[in-house]
Amino acid sequence: MAGSHKAGHGRGGSRKGAAGAPPARRRRRGKLRLVLALLVSLLVLAVAGVGWLYLQLNGDIRTFDDGGVSGERPAASAKGQNVLVIGSDSRAGDNEQYGHGDGDIGRSDTAFLMHVHADHKHATAVSIPRDTLVDVPPCKLPNGTWTKTRHNVMFNSAFSVGDTAKGNPACTQNTVEKLTGLRVDHTVVVDFAGFAKMTEAVGGVQVCVPKDIYQGDLNPNLHARGERLFTKGVQEVSGQKALDYVRIRHGIGDGSDIGRIQRQQAFIASLMKKVKSQGLSPTTLFPLAKAATASMTVDPGLGSADKLISFAMSMKSIDLHNTKFVTLPWRYEGARVAIVKPQADALFAALRADRTVDGEDAGGKQEQAQAASPSPSPSAPPSGAGVSVAVYNGTTTKGLAARAADSLKAGGYTVTGTATAATQDFVHTVIEYGPGARAHADALAQRFPGALLRQAKAAGLSVILGSKYADAPADDASANNAPAAVPSEVADKARSADDNICSGLSYG
């Protein structure tokens, strides 16, 4: 019996040993396991939630065919990024409930080019009036053929090339690149429905109205005063009312598109203020992201939630005061708008050089690091050493090819010959490069600001000079070192995103 007792005791001791701790310690470990299990469960739910969020956003994102983007493009640059934002007024699909017109052909109601400076602390948005007379380069049609260049036509006509409900973002991008000499890194199209839903997602946006506005002001075809849409003063608008505010032309001042552009700039600034004030938390950002992705058409480079969120987060450090809105220098030409030069050229040159509206060099850390690095020794070979290039004059200006050839030789290039191009109507300088010569073409483009790149089947490298090069001052040290600057008449009218919403508004 005693032995039985000992054996039983031994089994009891064995069970206690298996537990590895007295009852109190087992309870503590049991609680720890419960907490860990709960944390793991929460983590799984969180990851699943994020996955669901990404799936939802990815499912909503639409992209346009970038096969319509021109092969003749400005060279890529490390000096900031350029984002083209197009407002589409198509009445197709969900947009039907928001429009005040007929037809389902996509049209561009507004457009601006946002230059995000390389330091990711400054941004400059350039509004392009829809009635601006521009050259629209060849654009791809739905059937795969390409149009011919059209001269002196309205800017917003580029978006309608092909007469489709979704519009032609690639054609507008081609037009902007030709106009500015800036490479468009991303293009975003926002439609009526999406714009309205985004304003609802943030709980409304503050605007300033100079007087009472009625239905007849928004739609002159009504031939009646109609109901009052806006009461004079500061107020919050969202949905249809927000859309009415940014689209209204008639009934305020002279009813011009220029006055409307300035109100749109104030509205975008106010929207940015609202988003910043709410903070960048998932709770506030998800409704906005959901509304945005459901309404946007983007280039393939932004065609996923990862890419969109990464791009958005890259701009989170841009201060409201350092976000500037300007309008392309313009003047009236009859009922249309003409571009004022050389102010417009100077504006785009400043952005290509990554100069802010305030005249700062916003080149960012990369340029600062380069500036801090030791300069190459005088004995180091020049950047053009070992590279051969042919030079052609694509203008009627005599001696231009020789002038460029001398400059290239001074930079170490071997000029294989100079000649007159097949046609003398080139505006931008074009750099043609054969297989394997893209890197040399990019380096060569740095010597010809605003140059377009064109891939060729034949080997080698050639430069076809355009009238913009002919109009530029002859290459010398003082010209090359002179910093580009936004013209004072443009800078003085710039709007900061933190300006009072009632200030700086033009009503015609």
Image (spheres, helix red, strand yellow):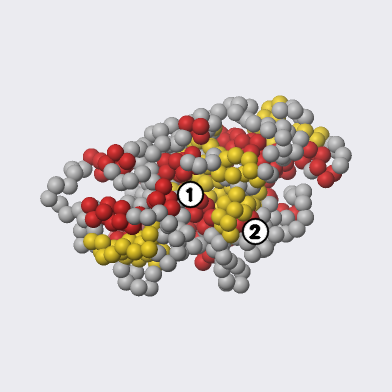
Q: Is residue 48 visible?
A: no
The crowd level at tag 1 (other Cα within 10 Å; few <14, some 14-19, many 20+) is some
Q: Nearer the viewer, residue 434 or 312?
A: 434
Q: Position of residue 12 (x, y in %)?
A: 35, 56
Mark 1 secondary-structure assignment = helix
State left or right for residue 329 relative to residue 192. left
Q: Amino acid at mark 2?
A: Ser
What separation in Å lies between label 1 and label 2 (alpha carbons)?
20 Å
To which residue does mark 1 refer? 180
Q: Quadrant location of residue 147?
A: bottom right
User: How many numbered circles are shown?
Assistant: 2
Report if residue 505 is visible in the image. yes
Does residue 66 appear left or right of residue 164 in this picture? left
Depth check, mark 1 against mark 2: the one in front is: 1
**Which residue is situated farthest in the left direction here?**
379
**Amino acid type at mark 1:** Thr
The residue indicated by pointer 2 is 160
Horizontal side, residue 197 vs residue 376: left or right: right
